[in-house]
Amino acid sequence: MDNKTIIIAQSGQPCAGSEVASREALILDTIKSMHWPGKTMARRAASAVRALFKWMMQTGRSELDKLTLADIREHYISRMCSVSYAKSIRYGMKLAFRYLADSGCVGIDCNAIFSLKVATRNRLLPAMPPEDIAKLLESIDRNTPRGKRDYAFILIGAAFGLRCCDIATLRLGDMDWRSGTISIVQSKTGLSTALPLLEGVGEALKDYILNAREKCSSDFVFVASDGTGRCIPRGTIQKAFAAYARKAGITRAAGDGLGFHSLRRSVGKRLVLGGVSLPTISQVLGHGSINSAERYINLSEDELRSCALDFTLVGEGGASWK
């Protein structure tokens, strides 16, 4: 790629908003057209590039190839201090700057910067309460084809804690009706997971597949309604969930963490309350690391209470350790 097309302002002065947007779009189009091992990597790299351009305009930086290590360190630290999920943001920045360096847009190697540990916000997102899950499922009209479909994929999320992306790409061949299992390779971690095909989930899937699913040769369980045989977008699952939550009278607020992914946290919390070990929870939910399962302990008041110290060693004058 010609470096001249990457420079935000040829003259060293901030250029017009439309010109900045066109140059940003040029880089984003290139990133999206590249061959990535997964779509998630492309999304994270593109998000990091958009954040970089926004920061440059806010701070008066004008050219990508004039950025210094100090500039990139400042951008990295400011970004890390404003996000909740530092690991994924850091990974996206690594991908983006690797591309910018390889293409000559940035003339320095800044990989070492992304190894810096920065204190970040750690917001504990809630699990959807069981009673709200029940109300939401009851609000679905299972007499209609769409209702049968929506009930099936929301019940899968509530029973197994699968992510939207894995539910959307679920295939007919993933289900072994004789052995009563669902086997998938999770798109986020690449790990295979085998889950028991619970009776209620199996009945909901059979009702949808036999009575409501569009007739086509596609192997996807949940097919789009446009006749192409493609899987439904994960956004369809999220929007349907939000619509039924409103219908069920479940109070929501922006950023409350009670979207579809809260079903996954609900499954993790139930497993913790049931006394299931962290390694088993990680296997059930398909985590890449056992550390990912530790967050569900924080959702259980009883488990947190068992970790707290009592006050037997604290006297009137303060602690008296012996």
Image (spheres, rainbow, N blue to C red):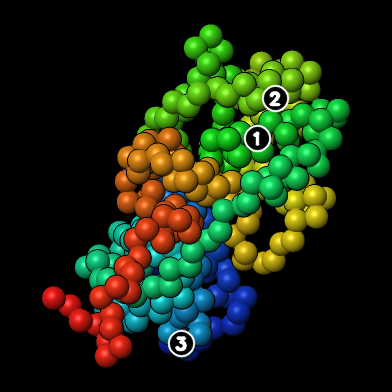
* Disc number for residue 155: 1
Q: Position of residue 73 (x, y in %)?
A: 31, 78
Label 2 close to label 1 by CB (< 8 Å): yes
Q: Quadrant of the C terminus?
A: bottom left
Q: Earlier in the sequence, mark 3 or mark 2?
A: 3
Residue count near mark 3 (Cα–Cα under 10 Å), binned few <14, some 14–19, many ≥20: few
Q: Earlier in the sequence, mark 2 or mark 1?
A: 1
**Residue 91 shows in the view:** yes
Decide which of 47, 305 is in the foreground and name it.
Answer: 305
In this rendering, the answer to whether 34 lies above or below 142 is below
Decide which of 214, 81 is in the foreground and name it.
Answer: 81
Left or right of residue 142: residue 127: left
**Residue 68 shows in the view:** no
In this rendering, the answer to whether 95 lies above or below 218 is below
Give me the residue at 58% from left, 19% from top.
172
Residue topped by disc 3 = 59
